Amino acid sequence: MVRQQKTSKSTSLSKPTPIAQKPKPIAQKHTHGNKYHYQQRNKQPNHQPDQEIGRAAKCENQAIAEHKQDLTGIITQELFESFNNIQGPFSENLQVFNKNPEYITRRKKELKKEDDLDRGQITKEVAREKQKEKETRDRAVTETIFVTIENKKAPVMNGHGPRHVKVANGQDKHNDGKPPLRAILGNSASQRQQDTSTVYHSPESSFKRPRHPRVMYPGHQRTTGVSVNHRLKVTPQSDAPTPAVAPITPPASPEYAQTTTAAKATYKEDIHGGQGETGNVVTNPKVKVPLKFDPSLDPVSTLNFYCAANDFEKPAYNIFNKLRNLHCSVQIAGDVYSSYPQEFTDKETAYQRTAQIAIQRIMHAQSHQKLSACTFSDVEFIDGLYKELLKHPHGILGHKLEDWYGSTFRQHLPSHWYDLIVKSNKIRVEHGIDPRIILFANDPGSSEPDRTSITTLPQMVLPWQSSEGGSHDWNMFISFCDSTKIVWARMIDQIANFEELTKHIGRQMESPHFRQKVSKPYAQEVYLVEMPDGWNRVRAISVDEETRSGRYHFIDFGDVAMFHSEDLFHCPPQFLALPAQAVCLSMYALDKFEDHPHALQVLTKELDGQTVVAHVLTTEKQFLELGGSAQGVVENGKRRACLVATLYDTSTAEDIHLNDLVAKRITKCTPAPSLSDEKKIGKTTPILVSHINDDGDLMVLLRNDDLKFVERSIAQTVADLGEQDRVSYSDLLHDRHIFVCDETVDGVKQWFRGRLVTRPLNPDEESFDVYYVDDGRQRKAHISNIYRLEANNRALATFPPQAIPVRLHDVPEIGGHMLHRLRGLIPWRTEALLKVVAMDGGKPLVNVFIREDPESMYMCVNIGLRLELEMASSLNNDI
């Protein structure tokens, strides 16, 4: 009955809804009417029709809308009136203000005077506040309050241990995972507000690298890590802006209340001296009792005895729920020891295992505190370490070196121990899998560190189809193009592994601990080099010991570069588990473009950095016969690919045949040789004089890479020609360029690229007029000496003709006797120098310089011809 009365009372006194509070008689009338109608309808269901309810609701909504509209109009009108009242005076004052500069100056002085008065008042108030704070601190020294709380009601310190919160229904609810309750502080509560700088400069929080890693759980904020008793024992810093009196903190249990009295006596200050000096009461700090493991006690009991012997708080265990399992940590004297990532099913097991871990770490810390600093010199340290490492042929792990060295020599490692080991020739460092370093002693008598065997990377597993006749279409990313026969690409499905490897290499090499320079590089060894885009793996191709430099191949990209030995770093073994990512491909039907002087720029533009589909024409059996290496085989210093493929661009509506596209672009981008450029006028150009026609004009060849490519391609094509390559009459009808074997010079075979002067008309013809496009001569050729060129070498067939016609400048007309003298002076394919003087239409006017032998001086052919003509004329006049 009492509950019902309280409930009904609270219901009747509840706050009405906002609509009911509005002073709208119509809305209230209908509201009460509806309420009355609802009560009567329960007794008499058919007493009143539903139409009245609808009309009442409609009237109520209409009244509310009218009220809102009226209110909006009133507010708008008031705003306009206020604005008009303010606008006029403000405009007038602004005009007066702008026109009167004296008023501006006077007003500034008044404001400055007011500001000085305000500052003086503020300074006085601050001084009074400081005086009050000082008087409060003086009173607080003599008024110390101690609060003793029972164990079951003691507040939890630093967020650890069991917590209970009183909920609304009066029951105790476990509060795991929630913020801890604040301790009762008595009259000293205001003094517990520590400054942020004081907290961060506390002994525990100042460690840059903790001795034992402590795992923090999500959502858990670690406190300053200072226990109650520890904070009572720490002397406050003299320069810290904290009160002079030590903060008063209640103990967590009654049996430790007596330590607070000692703390008070220790921190009692002589406030009358004003110097902050301590009083005459001096207490000797208690020696810390070491932890000793007793097999007869369980870990939890051992920790309890350890804390009691050192006047620490009892171990505070903290349980974290994770689904069905538990995580546990324990706090001892401000340090937290966690059993993470171990999980437990019950609290008792979690407590025992966590206590065991805490005991191990405390004893480990105690053993290190007993060690002295290293007293050995650098030489003594290396010699002593070397002698001990000889007893361990399998080496010592780097992360265990500190404990092993401390237990062996009873001293700490020197701070620069790693630098000493790296520079020493008695000890070598190798990288493990984790990544962890391993220390080995070199064989006695060795003058330099042992060299391990040449690094062998695992071969990449190519995605061959199970069926022999199946197509092999691989998604690839072009990383580098060297030529049409050496195109480097990476598998798309392997790029994620490569990026992961690059990320881990970058993270590890950021630490100087792992950046080991290579003292002496070896060929075929894999090293690391730092590039602007990150760290890359390279393999040494050749090493020059004198210059300490060499050529290195980027095994994940394909390109080659020169590096000095000091740019190389050792590659840890864990970064050699991933195979070399660059796959070497040869473009099908483009092998003749390999040495093309204009191919590389086209390949770089069309393929480099593109994602393509490689249709591999090589079968798995052929791949193994060719060498079975994804990076090709190096023979006589030249790399040969084991895979032949046709590349396609599938990003468009229709697939683009990239092999054919590259061939056409190379042909289009190859310029014809020319001397008509105005930039060449007045400049000397090396040439070969290939022919002098009947008019005295010279046919010259520019000595450049284009001519070398033509000569080299002719020699390679001739070696592969056979009887099946001879032309037929039908071939001469559509082939533009042909291959001609000329035997007119002493029966010696000479090969030229040729073009028919006229189209053949009779199938019975056997001899044809052929113009040698790289020589400038026109000869008769028998059909038996003509071979197909376009079918055998597409690159050579589409290469521009190299012969350029030029005319000698400022020479008399050449003919008859002078023509024979000129041909005798400049034999076929004579090396000469040419200087363009002017242009005669499309034909350059040039001066030509030759010399009889390499030891003689150059002479100008133009001057020689003019002198020859003058001498001939003078002789004729004498006769």
Image (cartoon, rainbow, N blue to C red):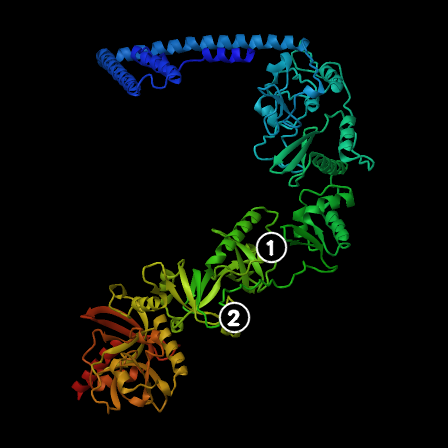
Left or right position of 19 against 616 = left
Left or right position of 389 against 841 = right
Left or right position of 602 against 254 = left
User: How far apart are labels 2 and 1 at the CA level?
Assistant: 27 Å
Check the image and report above or below for 442 versus 869: above
- Count the labels in the image: 2
Residue 619 on image: x %, y %: 48, 72
Residue 790, by quadrant, is bottom left
The answer to which of marks 2 and 1 sits earlier in the sequence is 1
For label 2, the crowd category at 10 Å Cα-Cα, with few meaning under 14, some 14 to 19 and many 20 or more, is few
For label 1, the crowd category at 10 Å Cα-Cα, with few meaning under 14, some 14 to 19 and many 20 or more, is some
Left or right position of 398 against 36 = right
Which quadrant: the C terminus?
bottom left
Residue 252 visible, this orientation: no
Residue 847 visible, this orientation: yes
Residue 299 on image: x %, y %: 76, 35
Check the image and report above or below for 625 versus 577: below
Query: As shown in the figure, which amino acid type bears the numbered disc 1?
Result: Gln
Task: Give the secondary structure at mark 2.
Answer: strand
- Foreground of the two, 426 or 864: 426
- Foreground of the two, 180 or 230: 180
Residue assigned mark 1:
574
Residue assigned mark 2:
634
Residue 413, by quadrant, is top right
**Measuring 32% from the left and 60% from the top, which residue is drawn there?**
653
Residue 467 on image: x %, y %: 49, 70
**Measuring 51% from the left and 66% from the top, which residue is drawn there?**
630
**Measuring 76% from the left and 49% from the top, which residue is drawn there?**
384
Query: As shown in the figure, which amino acid type bears the numbered disc 2?
Result: Val
- Foreground of the two, 629 or 708: 629
